[in-house]
Structure formats: C-alpha cells, structure tokens
Amino acid sequence: MAELITIERHILEQQRKFPGASGELTQLLSDVTFAAKLVRREVIRAGLVDILGSAGAQNVQGEEVKKLDQFANEKFIQAIGHHGRFAVMASEENEDIIIPPTEKSGKYVLLFDPLDGSSNIDANVSVGTIFSIYKRKSALGTTATVQDCLQKGVDQVAAGYVIYGSSVMMVYTTGQGVHGFTLDPTIGEFLLSHPNITIPKRGKIYSINEGYYRYFFDGIKKYIKYLQQEDKETNRPYSARYIGSLVADFHRNLLYGGIFIYPRTKKAPEGKLRLLYEANPLAFVCEQAGGRATDGYKRILDIVPEKLHQRTPLFIGSEEDVKIAEEFEQGLREVEHDRELIPSMLAEVSRAESTLLR
C-alpha cells in the first residue's frame, strides 16, 4: 500500500533538510490550502447556491466579475488575513493592496489570483487559484506598503496553484522542485500524488488563442505555421489545445510538455496576463520543473514590476519549445518549407515547363 503523505508533512520533511528553518512556511502554505478548500467547497456546488453568473460589476482590469470569482476573493482574504503571518496582500480583483488587521507582525507578502479562468465558470470548465509568497521588504513593526508587493519574481519564496477540476490538485514549489497534491474529499487532506514534477524538454502541444490571429505580429503567425507543418524529425505538426483557463492549460502542459503563449498583440502591445498574479508564480513553478518562462525577449522572473496590475506577454512551457517560439517572436527565424510539399511543387514546375516547351 502506498504511503499517504499530506502536504503539511511533505513541507515539514523538506524543511528538515535546511537547519535553521523556522517552520513558518508550513503555516503559510497551510493558510493557502485552507482557503483553497473553502473555494473548492463552493465551486462544486456553485449552481445550487446561486453563485454562478455575473455579479453585475467590473474588476480593476475592466473585466466582468463573476459571482464565484468575487466569493473566492473574499474567502481568501478572510481565511488568510487574520493569522498575523502576512504583512500585506494583493489580489487581481482589488485595485489597491490589502492590509490585514495584524499587518505589523507579518513577515510575508501574498499575491494571488483567487479564481483564474472565471469566464468559464458557467460552462463548468476547470478553474483555479494562483498564489505567490514573498518576504516583506519593509521593517517589522511598520505598516507594509505597495513596494513590498513590487518585487521581482526571482525573489519568491513559494508559489503555486490549485486547479478545481474532476479532482482538486495543488501544485507548489519553494525553490526545491515542484510537487503536486490531490485533495482526498473523504478526509479533507491534500495527499502527495505527483512528486518531483519535471516538464519534458520538448512537447507536442501548443496553447494559444488563435481567435486573435489577425492581431498577432508576424513572428507569432510564422511560429503557428511552423507548428502546423509536417516534419517527423521534430514531431510536427503539434496538437492545438486551448481551454481558455490559464491554470488548466498550464497544468496540462506541465505534465505532458508543450508551450502556452499569450503574446503581445496589436490590440494589447504590453500583453494581457498579469505579471504579479499569474506570470511570476507560474514562471517560478515552470523553471523549478525544468521549463522556461519569458515575455518573448527576457526572463519573466527578472522583470522589475512598476505597478500592481502590470501586464506582460507570456511564453511558458517546455524549454526547447519556448526557445524556438522566442526566435520567431524576435524575427530570428523563418518558417521552413514543408518537406512533404517540396517534391510535389517541383513536379508541378516540371509539368509547367514541359507545357511551355511544346
């Protein structure tokens, strides 16, 4: 019988490898898992308690707020904000930072997207929570400021996500690899199910919203054409898989290999995804699993944020796939001729020449 390892036990065992560890990280992640359980409880019975559909408002991003999205945001703030471990929090749904009542004793910063993929809620598509933890920069005993939140992704001490699908799974990293835990609803515990997740160096899946094709710049258009060409040496063509829920698309590619792209476009030249709440935490997870995450030009984790709701393009997934996509984005690579078409094209030219010579 396989040994049952809870997420709390796993974190404690990881901490024992580092003498001097305070154990606070275990408490921080326990706070997050508790909040995730509250959200999961409502996700699975959303249609029964009238929290599907629109809340009749827009968030700071100018997007329609879903009722369950709003609920998830409130539950995270309530579940985590009174434990005294976080000095400040920031959510994708709130315009400004959130200062907990016990902020002066808190040593950490929590940034989160309470319910990613909320536009899919009414269709019962997988949604998720993304979170990121930093150490505060301001002095203990003082009130934290927005500057505590504006840190580079490379400074994260922990990050991860929870996906609410056919099962509920939490994936996290503290900089020592990536591990996945599946919620056993019969005992209410997250149990280790995917230890030491490693993303393949190259996959066979690409995830991008091709509905925006007309707004893509030429490099991305050429990259899509490249992926659709047939070439046995590079296992092309790739399969297009796009759910429209970032957590779900990223989770699949993390396990199977592949690339997720939300590029800059003519309509959104600065990108669409949020650096602090989406790109940074997933980039940390991806790199710890052996993958790569950039904005098409530079590493996501090295970007210095200037504002809470800063947006960014995102190229994330298998290392080799991301590198090739970057070459197309930067104009360093052109589409190769489809090797299967070249013989037929030559034959067509030959026939045309023969007709002209008659």
Image (tube, grey):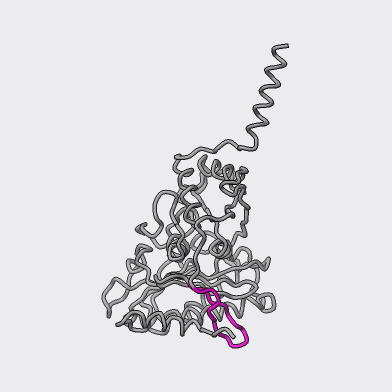
Instruction: Give the image quarter of residue 276.
Output: bottom left
On-image quarter of the C terminus: top right
Residue 186: within the magenta? yes
Q: Is residue 274 above or below residue 18?
A: above
Q: Is residue 175 left or right of residue 71?
A: left
Q: Is residue 84 left or right of residue 345?
A: left
Q: Where residue 82 sits in the image (x, y, percent)?
A: 42, 84
On-image quarter of the N terminus: bottom right
Report the magenta residues as a range: 179-195
Residue at the image position 62 percent from the left and 53 percent from the top: 240
Q: Is residue 45 left or right of residue 193?
A: right
Residue at the image position 47 percent from the left and 53 percent from the top: 313
Q: Where residue 273 sits in the image (x, y, percent)?
A: 49, 58
Q: Where residue 105 sits in the image (x, y, percent)?
A: 32, 82
Q: Is residue 16 above or below residue 239?
A: below
Residue at the image position 51 percent from the left and 37 percent from the top: 334
The residue lying furthest to the top in this view is: 358
